[in-house]
Image (spheres, coloured by chain):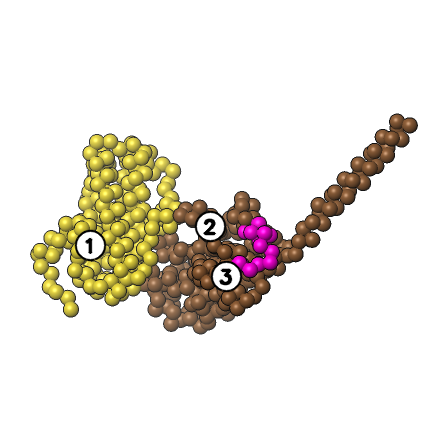
Amino acid sequence: MRGRLLAIAGLVAVVASAWLTSGATARPSATPPLTIYAAASLTEVFKALDGAQHFSFAGSNALETQIRNGAPVDVFASAAPLNTQRLFKAGIVDKPVTFTANRLALIVPKSNPAGIRSIYDLRSKPVKLVVAAPAVPAGGYTLSVLRKMGLSSVLSKVVSRESDVKAVTGKVALGQADAGFVYVTDARPVSDQVSVIRIPAWAQPRVRYEIAVVTKSPNKTAAQAWVRMILSAKGQTALKHAGFLPLPKASS
Amino acid sequence: MTRPLSRRRLLTVAAGTAALAALPVRPASAATEEELAYANFAVSSELLLADLYAKALAAKVVIGPGQAALRAGRRAAIQHAGALSGLLTGAGQDAPAAEDFDFQWPAKAFHTPDATAATARVVLRALHGAYQTAVVTVSEPSYGIVYTSLAASAGQQLGALSALGASGVVEPFPVALDLESASDTLEPYLG
């Protein structure tokens, strides 16, 4: 009799355990995925961090415009504080926070047909240069680097101004341009197709990424939790592994 | 229109940062990009130099007159960075700040007075070389005066390194460096 009771108790425990386990795993799918608008340079790292959300990656300026025009978005991650701060001032997003930083680099195709070894070579060699458009954060940072180094004259060699930094990376990787300015993190996924030419530390712009929850998000609690995840050790480690810089000293 | 240089104006330049701030430089917004490129490099390098002196003082391996030389060098580097930052902000550019960098030093850079002097010499020579070239590159005479003053200070600091006990090095013609070469020399330290 005692043996039968123990067997029944054991069965109940197994069934209860299975029910609880299935409940625990089913829970995330019950939560609707967030809609996250993010700078194109965050494509690989955000997808790797959380593939369950709906992402839209593009130039931060284009995403800002869409959010301003009422696109249904929960979280916005921008490659420049300018875009998030403008939306914050308009009451469209909650207070943005800085969550990572980056550096700019010059990339050339592996075959390097123009023979570029240094950013200064852009002055003297005939090159087809591709950059992001000035309104795109990467484009603005490019202008800043060239101005700081006294090299704005090389802009006369620009053959294409792209709508986001991934388009710049793509054109150089495919050999459609001799050189392009991108973030160092953009060069990593195509490291077999491009070579990276370092930009001096003294000429680097302050590339700061900000993230904010959209004020009218219907999933605000989940959106806030997602932002916290990006700021957590897990999120920061993933960003670091992707080549992003740690939180800047002033904002950490 | 540029006024001719008077002895008084030159002495004003030599008087240090306060005088530097009062230099009759033309409005910074009219500065050329090349003039500002040297200023951008120089601010970063002077911040690097200030960090070097601070680390050398913190290491406490240099004593006596050498320590005084380190303190004076640090003061000068901070004043230079501040004055050059003013030129940049006046031209509408963001001046580099110490928090923009993660300065890197060789493991034993400050273990002995000799090592400290050797590290400082690398940084000072690059700065001195860049300032020499800046003097002849800039189109505005008042900027030339600034860079001449900065080159002289870098030369004085190189001389003061002998106070660290290291053998003095007197070069008859210190090498002038273009911005690219000076930048390449300091890049490993700027992080």
Q: Colour of chain A?
A: brown
Say which residue label 3 marks.
A92
**Which numbered mark, 2 or 3, is in the foreground of this view?**
3
Q: Position of residue A41 (x, y in %)?
A: 51, 59
User: Is the C-beta separation of discs 2 and 1 under 8 Å?
Assistant: no
Q: Is residue B165 left or right of residue B106?
A: left
- Do residues under tags 1 and 3 come within 8 Å of each other at their CB atoms? no
Q: Chain of mark 1?
A: B
Q: Amino acid at mark 2?
A: Leu
Q: Secondary structure at mark 1?
A: helix
The front one of B8 and A94 is: A94
The tint of chain B in the picture is: yellow
How far apart in space, not on screen, are marks 1 and 3 (Cα)?
Answer: 43 Å
Residue drawn at the location 16% of the way across and 52% of the way down: B19
Say which of marks 1 and 3 sits in front: 3
- Residue at which label 2 appears: A245
Residue A163 screen position, x and y as percent: 49, 68
Q: Residues within 10 Å of mark 2 (few under 14, many from 20)?
A: some
Q: Which residues are magenta?
A: A214-227
Front in this rendered view, residue B51 or A156: B51
Chain letter for mark 3: A
In the rendered image, residues at marks 2 and 3 fall on the same chain? yes
